[in-house]
Image (spheres, rainbow, N blue to C red):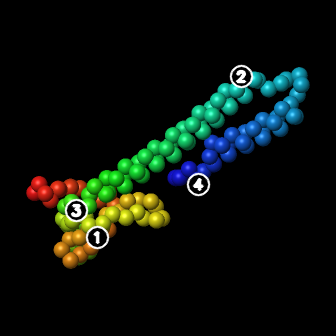
Amino acid sequence: MSISSIASASDIQMDYMKLLVTQLQNQNPLEPLNNNEMASQLAQFSQLQQLEQMNTSFADVLTTTNRSYANSLIDKQVTFFVRDTATGGMEKKEGIVNEVFNDPNTGESLLGVKVGEEDYTLGLGAIVLVRNLNLV
């Protein structure tokens, strides 16, 4: 689930502030709201907002790291498995990474791998072994 599909901490905090203002306007003067509870809730929203910002920063770092790693695989021999349509079993393939590109919909780094005359498009998670051809 992405952050955009749920309410962000800022949105929740704004909703809380509206609710708090309404409560303060309509409170019983003989039984006012507890200041400690309000301060505690505001501090929790602040922490949630900071965690969201850290999550976004880590996601950016991970994306950059994955792209760098994918680029480092160009001209390397990789091993991966594909499902054999005839038998349904897994078949081992080895090929050379000849291109790296990013899926515009997901931002995922994808590898173009040549195996003989066949071309495969793989995500980084599909690679099970990497060999440097200069050392083989």
47 with respect to 101 (left or right): right
Quick check: marks 2 and 1 in contact, CB under 8 Å?
no
In the picture of the structure, the residue carrying the numbered disc 3 is 75
In the picture of the structure, the residue carrying the numbered disc 2 is 36
Measured as percent of width and height from the top left, residue 95 is found at: 20, 66
Q: In which quarter of the image is residue 10?
A: top right
Q: Is residue 88 in view from this perspective? A: no
Residue at 30% of width from left, 66% of height from top?
A: 99
Front position in the image: 81 or 94: 94
Q: How far apart are marks 3 and 4 (CA)?
A: 39 Å
Q: Residue 5 carries which label?
A: 4
Q: Is mark 4 on a helix, strand or loop?
A: helix
Q: In which quarter of the image is residue 70?
A: bottom left
Q: Please, what is the three-letter code of the amino acid marked with disc 2?
A: Asn
Q: Quadrant of residue 72?
A: bottom left
Q: How far apart are marks 1 and 3 (CA)?
A: 15 Å
Q: Please, what is the three-letter code of the amino acid marked with disc 3?
A: Asp
Residue at 75% of width from left, 23% of height from top?
A: 35
Question: Which quadrant, please, contains the C terminus?
Answer: bottom left
Q: Please, what is the three-letter code of the amino acid marked with disc 4?
A: Ser
**Vertical comparison of 8 with 111: above or below:** above
Q: Which of marks 2 and 4 is nearer the N terminus?
A: 4
In the picture of the structure, the residue carrying the numbered disc 1 is 120
Measured as percent of width and height from the top left, residue 71 is found at: 31, 57
Q: Earlier in the sequence, mark 1 or mark 3?
A: 3
Front position in the image: 113 or 23: 113
Which one is closest to the eye, mark 1 or mark 3?
Answer: 3
Q: Distance between the residues labelled 4 and 1?
A: 32 Å
Which one is closest to the eye, mark 3 or mark 4?
Answer: 3
